[in-house]
Amino acid sequence: MGPELLSVDARKPKSKDSAFRYAELRRLFSLIWPFRNSLILGLCATLIYISLHTFSLAAAFPVFKVMLDKEGLDGWINREVVSSRLGIDIAPIDVGDDTKEIVVSHVQDGSVADIAGVLPLDMWIAPDSQTMAEYQHFTARSTKEKIALHIKSAETGELRVKTVSLRALDWKTHAMLWGRGLLPENASQSPLDLLKYILIVLIIVVVLANVFRYFGEIWIASAVLRSMMSLRATLYAHTLHLPVSYFSEQSTSDTVTRFIQDIQEVQRGMLTLFGKFIREPLRAIFILALAFVFDWRITLAMVFVAPLTVVIFWAVGRSVKKSNRKLLQAYGKMIGALTTCFQNLRVVKAYTAEDYEHDRLRLVDRYMFRQQLKLAKLQAFTSPMIETLAVIAGSFATVWLASRVVSQEIDTSRFAALGVILASLFDPLRKLTDVYVRVQRSTAGLERIFQILNQPIEQQSDDAGARLKPLAKSIDFVEVSFTYPGADRPSLRDINLSITQGETVALVGPNGCGKTTLVSLLSRFFDPDEGKILYDGLDIQEANLRTLREQVSLVSQDAIVFEGTPVENITYGSINSAMGEVEKAAQRAHADEFISRLPGAYSATLGERGTTLSGGQRQRLAIARAIFRNAPLLIFDEATSQIDAESELEIQQALREYALERTTIIIAHRLSTIQFASRIVVMNEGHIIDSGTHDVLFERCPLYRTLCETQLVSAST
C-alpha cells in the first residue's frame, strides 16, 4: 500500500528540486506583489521595531555604567570624546574625584597628542583650579579650534604647555553627546536618579518597539492572507477551466488537497518568510552593527558559527522539502479515502466493511506518520544544533572578553554590555532554524499548486472562435474516433452520424459501448483523436467554447444536486431568474410536488450532494435545471433510471412537449423512454451498427432485439 500512495512524479529523483530555488522565491514574491502596500507598511514597521529593539540593547551599556563603574556615564562620555579628539587613552576616574592629573597610557600615531610630542606615561594636568574631571568635560564639549595642553614629561618631570588643534567630532562622539543631551543635566550627581531615568526611557522604547512589531505583523499577515485568497481564487478559476481529461488522469482528492493543505503550507511559509525570515536577519545585522560600535572583534564569534549554520540549513532544507512533498500527496490519499468512505457509508455498512475501511485508512495514516516523524526529527535536530554551536562560540567569546577585562583593555561595564549583545546576537540565528524549515515546506506546496496552474486550460476568451447561434441545420459526426487517456483501446471508432435540427435521437447499446462518450465529445469535454464534429457545418473546435456549451441543456447519468436551495439548483449557471420560471420548470419536471412539501419549499436547504432527497427526487431536480436552461439542444443521459413508473410517464409527456422545438439526444435503457424518438441509433464496442425506428430495428438488428428482450423490456416492466 505504501508505494501506491505516491504519484509517478514523486518516485522520480528530486535531487535538484529538493534544494531551495530562486525561481520559487520569485513565485512567492509574485503572489504578494499586488498587495505590496500593506507588505511595505509591515516591513517598515518591522524595521522601526528592529531599530528600537537595537536601541534598547544599547541602553544596557549606560545602565551598567551607572551600576558598575565609579566614573559614571558622564565620565565615560567625556573620556571617550577626549580620547577621540586628542588621540590618547587615559584611565577612568571618579566623577567626584578632585584629582588634577592623570597618566596617558597610549598615544595614537599621527594624532593631535602625538604631533604635540605627548608620550605614553606622560601626565596630563588640568589647568588653574579645575579638576581633571571638569577639564575633561570642558575638552569634550569645547567649540574652540585650539586649546592649551598641559603635559608633564614622565622622563624629566618638565611641564610643557602645547597649543593643539582639536579634532572635529566624528559621528560616534556626536551620537554619544546627543544621547547625553537627552538626560537631565544634574543626572550625574545622583546615579540612582539617572538609572531611573534611563530605565523609564528604556520602557518607553520597548513599548514603542512592540507596538510597531504588532502593527508590522498585522500588516504583513493582511498582505499574505490576501495573497492566499487571490491564489485560491486563481487556482479555482484555473481548475474550473481545465479540460475534463485532466480529471480523468488526476485524483480529485489530490487536487482538493492542493486547495487546502498545500495553500496552508504556502501561507505559513509566507508568514514566516516576511515575518521571521526578514525580521530575524535584520535583527542580527543591527545587533552586529551595534557590536561593531563597541568592539569589531566580536564578529569572531559569528565567523565560527555562520559557515556551519549555512551547511546545516542547506542539508536539512533538502530533506524537509522532499518529505513534505510526500506528506502533501499522502494528505490527498487520506482525503480521497475518507470522502469515498463517508459518501458511500450505506454500502460500507451493508457489506460489513467497516474493519476493511479502518485498515485501509490505517495504512495511509502510517505513511503520513512516517513523513511527519521525519519532518519532526529534522526540525528537532536543527534548533538544538544551532543552539549548541551558539553556546560554544559564545563561551569562546566570553573567555576572550574576560581576558581583556583582566588585562584592563576594557572595563567591567563594557564586558557586561558586550555579553548582552553577544547573547542577543545568537537569538535571531536560533530562530532562523525553524524559519528555513517552514519556508522549505511551503515551496513543496507551491510546486504542487503550480503543477496545476501550469496545466493548459480550455479556451477561455469570449472573443476566441466563432460564436454559435441556435442550431439551424444539423450536427454531424464525421469519422470520429476517441481513446480515453491511459486506455488500451478506443471508446469510439469511425463514428459517422448526422442529427438534424428538431430531431429526437435515442442512443442505445450495451454498457461501455460509447454512448456517453459520444455526447461528451459534442460538449467538448473531450476532443476527438480523429475526425471532426460539425455544428451547422462548422467544426466545433473552431467555435467559441462558451457559446457552444450555451446551446446544450444536460442531464447527466449521475443526478447532480449542489448544496443549497432548490431555486439555486434549478437556476444553476443563470444570473437573472424569475421565480415564476423556476416554478414552471419544476412543474414540467414533476419536481414541484416534492419541493413544495420541503420545509421552506423552494428556499429549503438541501444537504451536501442532495443527501436529503431520494434518487428520483434528485433526478427530477436535475431535469428541472435542464428545462429551465431552455437550450436548443437537450441531452438526457440515463435521465430516468431512478424514477418510478408513474413519475416516468409524466416526465415522458413533458419530454415530448419539451423536445418539440429543440434537438434532443436521449441515452436510456427503458423502452418507454426511447419509443417516441424519431430515430434510434444502436452502438456496440465504439461503433454505430444500425439506426432507424423501433419497429425497423427490432426486425433487422439482432443486438437491438436482444436489448429490447432483456434490458429494455425488463427495465420497462
Image (cartoon, helix red, strand yellow):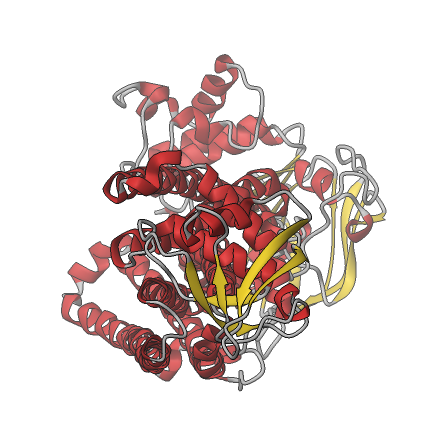
Q: How many marks?
A: 0
User: In this image, 214 relative to 157: left or right?
Assistant: left
Q: Quadrant of the N terminus?
A: bottom left
Q: Which residue occupies the foreground of this view, 379 or 712? A: 379
Compared to residue 468, the image places residue 495 above or below, namely: below
Compared to residue 25, the image places residue 631 above or below, namely: above
Q: Position of residue 650 (x, y in %)?
A: 42, 29
Can residue 610 be seen in the rendering of this structure?
no
Q: Which residue occupies the foreground of this view, 460 or 36? A: 36
User: In this image, 513 relative to 414: left or right?
Assistant: right
Q: Identify the residue at image location x=64%, y=29%.
A: 660
Q: Quadrant of residue 431?
A: bottom left
Q: Position of residue 643 (x, y in %)?
A: 36, 40
Can residue 350 be seen in the rendering of this structure?
yes
Q: Which residue occupies the foreground of this view, 689 or 442? A: 442
Q: Position of residue 32 (x, y in %)?
A: 58, 48
Q: Position of residue 289 (x, y in %)?
A: 52, 62
Q: Identify the residue at image location x=40%, y=48%.
A: 74
Compared to residue 261, the image places residue 418 above or below, namely: below
Compared to residue 71, the image places residue 634 above or below, namely: above
Q: Which residue occupies the foreground of this view, 48 or 645? A: 48
Q: Quadrant of residue 611?
A: top left
